[in-house]
Image (tube, grey):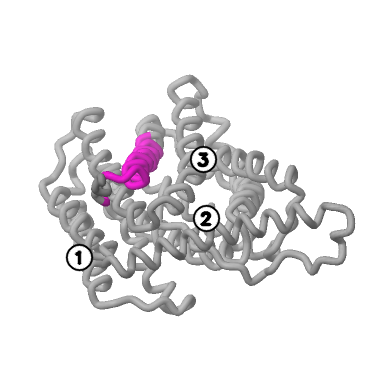
């Protein structure tokens, strides 16, 4: 009788690892696109995200229309979520005008302790000392990046105002945390497709209004050639693929693998900075990266019992979402009008993580 394959050689784990590196490269490519636009003097952060929201609205909104799904959450919750998400993207992309690509990628980890705090306060999630210790190490890595930029602000490679850029990234990461916790709350009462569709609709509307107020003159004065258009399109496509791939990873191997995979985006950012921009990377970045990696591993590590509970939770969420879709389809059949409608208290474990 053949022995079962080791846990790390199973197909679902290998697929999860591959998809994890895929979304990690997507996040790095968005940073690369934003950095390229900033180097060329294009300052239109909201415009970069507009196409992504339009794609979300068209694709997932089209799926909702095709399946004739009705909203299970009030529309104003999606409006609040979209405002926070749009402004988080705006602030983080704006930071590329002032600091380096590597600093943005590392400081984005600040969203993790913020999510920890917000879920503990509002969602009543309990965390052990091990997770808190891991978060503390992550914060120490963030402090190292800020310290490095404060004492090396005269370097051209770090941007015109690295400290200001660092503060913008921290503010944007905090908004990302608020967005993630709000989305976690909403997705427990709705479906992933509905959340993506409504986020796309309201995100596109809010972005359009903000562009007309803040970026209209910038767009007019920009010389729209291939070097300016391609980073715009690349940013939008990468963000759309990221939004679409994350739920698949959550179903296969959960949020732990996703968080560890996104961590490698910092390493990809360092490689881009060295080989694409031919810039010298300060040694503190490597120390900060190592500290952040250790902290995230400690935070994300789970024992066999916790992993089994997460697997059961994810499997139950998939079955429950399938049952809900079947229930919605049955309502469209003749004689199904007396049904009470979708259950608004259904839960799912497809809670999003920080970008």
Highlighted magenta segment, given as a residue range: 7-32
Q: Position of residue 329 (x, y in %)?
A: 75, 52
Q: Is residue 203 magenta?
A: no
Counting residues from the N terminus, which is met first, the one under dot 2 or under dot 1?
Answer: 2
Q: Is residue 236 left or right of residue 332?
A: left
Q: Are marks 3 and 2 in contact (CB under 8 Å)?
A: no
**Rendered residue at 51%/44% (across/down):** 244
Counting residues from the N terminus, which is met first, the one under dot 1 or under dot 3?
Answer: 1
Vertical placement of residue 250 versus 51, above or below: below
Which of the two residues, 193 or 179, is positioned nearer the viewer here? 193
**Rendered residue at 48%/39% (across/down):** 241
Q: Position of residue 32 (x, y in %)?
A: 35, 35
**Rendered residue at 31%/69% (across/down):** 305
Q: Position of residue 339 (x, y in %)?
A: 81, 66
**Numbered circle sitting on residue 137:** 1
**Rendered residue at 60%/58% (across/down):** 321
Q: Is residue 316 left or right of residue 264?
A: right
Q: Residue furthest left?
A: 283
- Residue 208 in view in this figure: no
Q: Quadrant of residue 273?
A: top left
Decide: few, some or many residues near mark 3? Use Cα within 10 Å; few <14, some 14-19, many ≥20. many
Q: Residue furthest top?
A: 226
Decide: few, some or many residues near mark 1? Use Cα within 10 Å; few <14, some 14-19, many ≥20. many
Determine which residue is flagged by label 2.
85
- The span from disc 3 to disc 2 (Cα, nearest Å) is 14 Å
Decide: few, some or many residues near mark 2? Use Cα within 10 Å; few <14, some 14-19, many ≥20. many
Counting residues from the N terminus, which is met first, the one under dot 3 or under dot 2?
Answer: 2
Determine which residue is flagged by label 3.
240
Q: Position of residue 346 (x, y in %)?
A: 61, 68
Vertical placement of residue 312 versus 192, above or below: below
Q: Please tell me whether mark 3 or mark 2 is closer to you in this view.
A: 3
């Amino acid at each position: 009788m053949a022995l079962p394959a080791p846990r790390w050689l199973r197909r679902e784990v290998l697929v999860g690892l591959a998809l994890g590196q895929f979304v990690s490269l997507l996040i790095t490519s968005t940073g690369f696109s934003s950095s390229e636009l900033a180097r060329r003097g294009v300052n239109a952060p909201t415009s970069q995200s507009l196409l992504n929201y339009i794609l979300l609205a068209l694709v997932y909104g089209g799926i909702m229309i095709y399946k004739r799904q009705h909203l299970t959450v009030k529309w104003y919750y999606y409006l609040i979520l979209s405002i926070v998400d749009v402004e988080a993207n705006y602030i983080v992309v704006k930071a590329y005008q002032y600091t380096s690509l590597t600093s943005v990628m590392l400081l984005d980890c600040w969203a993790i302790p913020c999510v920890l705090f917000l879920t503990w306060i509002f969602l009543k999630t309990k965390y052990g000392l091990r997770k808190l210790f891991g978060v503390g190490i992550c914060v120490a890595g963030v402090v190292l990046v800020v310290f490095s930029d404060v004492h090396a602000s005269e370097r051209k490679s770090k941007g015109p105002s690295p400290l200001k850029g660092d503060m913008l990234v921290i503010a944007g990461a905090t908004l990302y945390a608020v967005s993630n916790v709000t989305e976690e709350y909403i997705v427990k009462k709705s479906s992933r497709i509905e959340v993506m569709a409504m986020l796309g609709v309201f995100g596109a509307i809010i972005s359009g209004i903000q562009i007309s107020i803040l970026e209209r003159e910038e767009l007019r004065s920009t010389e729209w050639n291939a070097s300016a258009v391609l980073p715009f399109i690349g940013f939008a496509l990468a963000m759309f693929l990221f939004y679409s791939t994350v739920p698949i990873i959550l179903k296969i191997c959960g949020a732990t693998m996703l968080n560890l995979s996104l961590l490698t985006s910092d390493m990809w950012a360092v490689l881009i900075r060295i080989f694409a921009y031919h810039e010298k990377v300060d040694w503190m970045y490597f120390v900060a990266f190592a500290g952040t990696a250790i902290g995230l591993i400690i935070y994300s590590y789970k024992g066999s019992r916790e992993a089994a509970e997460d697997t059961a939770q994810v499997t139950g969420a998939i079955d429950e979402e399938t049952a809900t879709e079947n229930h919605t389809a049955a309502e469209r059949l003749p004689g199904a009008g007396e049904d009470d409608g979708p259950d608004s208290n259904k839960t799912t474990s497809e809670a999003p993580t920080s970008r």
